[in-house]
Image: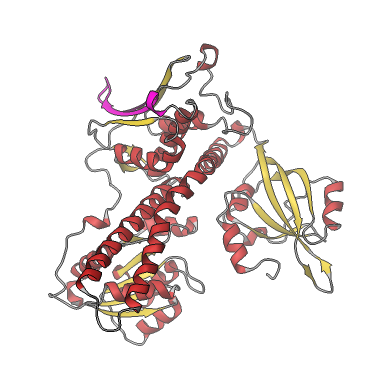
Amino acid sequence: MSFLSDEARAALDVFATPVWVVDVRRVALVWANHAALTLFGAGQPEPLQGTEPMRGASAALIAGLARLTPGARINGEFRVQRASGGAVTVDCTCTGLGLELEGEMRHALIEVRTERPTLAPESNSSDFEQRLQSRDRMASIGTLAAGVVHGINNPLSYVIANLEYVKRLVAGTPTRLEGRDLGELGDVLEDSLDGAERVRRIVSDLGAFSRSLDARIVSVDLERAVERALSVAQNEIRHRARIVREFAGVPAVLGTDAKLGQVILNVLINAAHSIEPGAIDRNSITVRTRIDSQGRPSLEIEDTGCGIAPQHLSRVFDPFFTTKPVGVGTGLGLSIAQRIVRELGGDVRVESEHGTGTKVLLSLPAAALTASPEPALESLPPFSTDRFRARVLVIDDEPAILRAFRRVLFAHEVTAVTSGVEAVQKLADGASFDVIFCDVMMPEMSGVEVYERIRDRHPGQECKLVFVTGGAFTEPAAQFIESVSNHKLKKPFSGSSLRALVASVSRANPSSM
């Protein structure tokens, strides 16, 4: 696909904005990013190859596509028919791509700027609600993007500067470091680790909102979900109000991290936007947990903002209703929050006094003690490397990741390969391992395919595989990984996580030690 480089397609594939490429001679689709597949109602790109997603476009827009030169742009509006039913009207920008084949411009990049459903909710309510939730979630993340970038760039700046300093310090020491240098080196590395941990927490918290809305209901720590939302929304709040926490240590609730995170984030953004910047000492947003009158865990988010006018209070849960200026917000936040909370068996209500502030109250069913909590790899018991030397196979297409595994697991026998094909061949040649770390997303053979090959050809060995995830993989892969009991390791990871997993997986297979 010479019309887009591999790097360009990889970057576009994580965009929240639907983007696709068409052959302008036939207006046929040749490539689409993940957001476009969601728009089209398709799970995979293959069935869409050669279809005509723009067949609802006007003759003028089609003619304009045919006349595009590389880099030139035209705007248009048309209706997209979705594979799963219904239609969406989109406003888009069409850009001519590079010249190909004897100077003839063959491809155009279509980027959706806005979309509005022309599908009646009653005709396919489940699909309609899922799409609204997904678009609103990504719109919220887009609103907070600048703050997230700021939160990452601050620690990343001193991490990079510190590591450059360490490199110069070590390079300038031909024999050994002096005591003073060693002390300073320790301080520099401690600051760097702290900064890297700050970045990891931000990325982890952001991932809880940006990933697909997993329908699997589990036990969720409500106060932890609040902290994650506060972390993501911090830059939006910090110039407007103080955060006041009044946590009562309530029981866990039933839900999913992504859905509850979306609800809390939407309410926090509304609270922040109700307060003008510049008077932090006079304004606050209070997050309060308690047990309500029915014995349910409850969350209250109370702000000292402008409040809601009486004539608007009855409409706050109406879809697309907003008092914000055009282009600010989707008008879906509270509507979607109400639907999600009701789906989980809870309820939400709003109390407000115009000019004084607003309180949003969320009540959710408590999780049973037997509900499955999200796994916490860091809580695995420590182990002594003196007891055994495990045989570890690491599969990842990133050489720097493989080098990091070798350094952290220096006390073990580590075999590192850059492809699933090579890993499967080593097992076929008779190699035996106590633990297999395998990246999920790899070219040639994915982590899921590696698991299936091992299961089919070396039964019993698949239980030693640990899925290593970077946070971006296909929905089928996500569903498969959740369906098996294997351990999961999220990037970025710590050395203690790796060592604990080696111990845990090896102990679960004592015959191999």
Q: Which quadrant of the figure contains the C terminus? A: bottom left
Q: Residue 31: horizontal and vertical position, in percent?
A: 66, 61
Q: Residue at x 66, y 46 (%)?
A: 82
Of 278 and 385, nearer the camera is: 278
Q: Residue at x 43, y 39 (%)?
A: 233
Please tell me whether residue 411 is drawn above or below residue 140 in the rendered image.
Answer: below
Q: Is residue 482 left or right of residue 67?
A: left
Please tell me whether residue 393 is drawn above or below residue 347 in the rendered image.
Answer: below
Q: Quadrant of residue 169?
A: bottom left
Q: Residue at x 59, y 31 (%)?
A: 122
Identity of the residue furthest to the bottom in this view: 429
Q: Is residue 72 left or right of residue 491?
A: right
**Is residue 300 within the magenta segment?**
yes
**Is residue 113 within the magenta segment?**
no
Q: Is residue 106 visible?
A: yes
Q: Residue 19: horizontal and vertical position, in percent?
A: 65, 53
Of 234 and 21, nearer the camera is: 234
Q: Is residue 458 visible?
A: no
Q: Is residue 458 left or right of residue 278?
A: left
Q: Quadrant of residue 265?
A: top left
Q: Is residue 320 left or right of residue 22?
A: left
Q: Residue 393: horizontal and vertical position, in percent?
A: 32, 77
- The range drawn in magenta is 280-302
Secondary structure that dominates the magenta span: strand
Of 359 and 60, nearer the camera is: 359
